[in-house]
Image (spheres, rainbow, N blue to C red):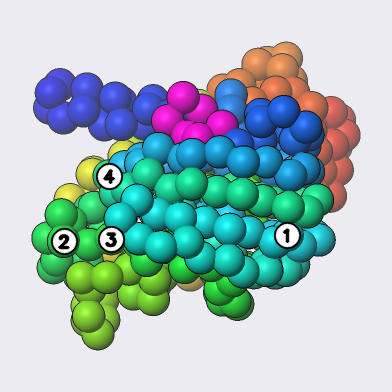
Amino acid sequence: MAVAGSRIAARAAAAFPIEETHGIPHYPGNQLIAHSGGLGWRNVYASYAAEQPWTATLRPLCHPCIAYFVNGGASITRRVDGEGPQSTALHARQFGMVPTRAASHWNLHGAPDILTLYLRNTTIDRVAEEVFGRDPKRVELRPRLGVTDPLLEQLALAILRATREGDASAGLYVDQLAQTMAVHLLRHHCSGIGGRTPAAATMPMSNLTRVVDYIDATIDGDLSLDAMADVACMNAYYFARTFRRRFGVSPHRFVLQRRIERAKQLLGETATPIVEVALACGFASQSHFTATFHRHVGVTPSGYRRG
């Protein structure tokens, strides 16, 4: 059990570092608006920047990278090693995908606002293998330019909102978005998958009970979707879908409800300072706790305690 606990803790603590990205928002002239660095997100690295014309060679990375044009547009010329050049105009609400297995040479003209997302390769690999039954080595993101995809857009915008809010406690929510994005990218934007549809999955009640016990025991920590899925002995994608069917809410929403209930208990039955209540219930700060509590309960923590 100690070994399993160590493995879960290690996975929960592994944040996605900027060093494993291309660092495009930091190119000369580009203005970084928001990024996920320091938020502890595990499966996604997000950056939002106002970009200026740039020319660069992007080295191949193991992590799939997609760019979503939030505002404005750009004229792009791209050449992937071993292929001829490709030129196109990208507009707001369109995506571009960066090749993962070859260097690519880019020339961007324009001043667009771009959200750049890197999805951790192990997330993609596990979904390819465990959900689609495919060898991850045979799966590759198609390096398309000018793609319009409504579902991918909604997922990207949700990550953008979390990025701009800078909420360190949104890691579990972003984990769920990453799992959904991985499945969608594999089904619609990757080679090597074919027409296979994810199969249904079930979770025994005993596994479900273990997950709830784990959540309650770790309510003051950084709960991750991968860690909870490990407790349930399931793939994270299947776990999130099955959990929602059983409880009627997502794991993220369930954990938030559990934290609010724990906070109510501490506020009503103890004299614990509010800042300590916040930390004991897994909130990043007293201010975040106060805002979240007020939004869900209708009063501030101090008002609840007085009442």
Circle 1 crowding by C-alpha within 10 Å: few under 14, some 14–19, many from 20: many
Marks 2/3 in contact by CB < 8 Å: the verdict is: yes
Find residue 297 and report its horizontal and vertical position in percent: 77, 49
- Image mark count: 4
Circle 3 crowding by C-alpha within 10 Å: few under 14, some 14–19, many from 20: some
Query: Residue sitting at 63 percent across and 59 percent down?
Result: 76
Q: Which residues are magenta?
A: 18-23
Q: Which residue is mark 1?
A: 74
Query: Residue sitting at 67 percent across and 67 percent down?
Result: 90
Quick check: 110 above or below 184? above
Circle 4 crowding by C-alpha within 10 Å: few under 14, some 14–19, many from 20: few
Amino acid on which the number 3 mark rests in the picture: Glu
Find residue 245 and report its horizontal and vertical position in percent: 39, 72
Q: Which residue is mark 3?
A: 140
Amino acid on which the number 2 mark rests in the picture: Arg
Query: Residue sitting at 23 percent across and 44 percent down?
Result: 230
Image quarter of residue 195: bottom left
The quarter of the image holding the C terminus is: top right
Amino acid on which the number 1 mark rests in the picture: Ala
Farthest bottom residue in view: 195
Comparing 262 with 53, the one in front is: 53
Marks 2/4 in contact by CB < 8 Å: the verdict is: no
